[in-house]
Image (tube, rainbow, N blue to C red):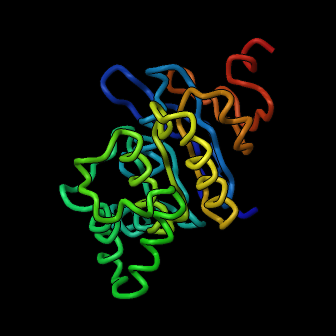
Amino acid sequence: MKTLMTLNDIILRRDEFTLQTDRLELLSGQVYNLHGPNGAGKSTLLHVLALLLTPQGGAISFQGIDVNSAQTRSRLRKQITLVEQNPFLFNTSVYENLAFGLRLRDVRGELQRRRITQALQAVDLEEFAERRAQELSGGETRRVALARAMILRPQLLLLDEPTAGLDRDVLPIFERCLTALAAQGTTVVIAGHDADQHQRLGGELLCLERGRLIATSVNGLSCQQKETA
């Protein structure tokens, strides 16, 4: 697999919290499960990976390009999508929510309709195209947010607690989408607490504690097990 993104000697201070990462390498088409207790810095690290937060120290490289200017960050962000823990949807139909990002990329007409249909089929919400976003349940909102992210075909997809509160019967649909994206070459980073999800999705486990990565590539173990092994 090719290297998509690297973080070296990252230091980011926010009030009394410090995120410190000696080295993190993300490979194309790989799934990463980012685990750690509340307050460990998972969301902060996702925002650094999304190029939305600028560290005070260290270096970031994306597809071999050094991220060293605001102009470079702005250009590379188009290849990265972050789905927040509580995703925001516009007060329009589900279809219009998905169409918005495609229009910004000049994807219109039949191609736009086909991609929206495919994305809604993937999250098992094909019949929801004309449903108003405000009429959706929490789980449906998360699935629409995932479809909206998928439709942009990012190189890097970052998800903050994407399955929290999802019904157990919906979880396999959600996870199937993630593994399919990775198979197509998208790098997926999922922040959460579900140790079993790492077993189901495979990939690599990233353990974060008090702002520091304490372990990587721990296949078959939870972060807690790694600490005590």
In the rendered image, the quadrant that contains the N terminus is bottom right
Along the horizontal axis of the image, is 91 left or right of 183?
Answer: left
Q: Is residue 189 above or below residue 156?
A: above
Q: Residue at image x 62%, y 38%? A: 33
Q: Relative to residue 39, is residue 58 depicted above or below?
A: below
Residue 54 seen: no
Give above or below for 220 relative to 96: above
Q: Is residue 226 left or right of residue 109?
A: right
Residue 196, horizontal then vertical, whole percent:
68, 29
In the image, farthest residue toward the top: 228
Residue 208: x and y in percent read: 58, 27
- Split into 4 quadrants, where in the image is the C terminus? top right
Q: Is residue 128 visible?
A: yes
Residue nearest the observer in this picture, 222 or 110: 110
Instruction: Say which of 88 and 67 sits in front.
Output: 88
Q: Nearer the viewer, residue 87 or 53?
A: 87
User: Which residue lies at the image location 74% right of the left edge and 17% below the top edge?
Assistant: 225
> In the shown orientation, is residue 203 left or right of residue 171?
right
Report whether 107 appears left or right of 191.
left
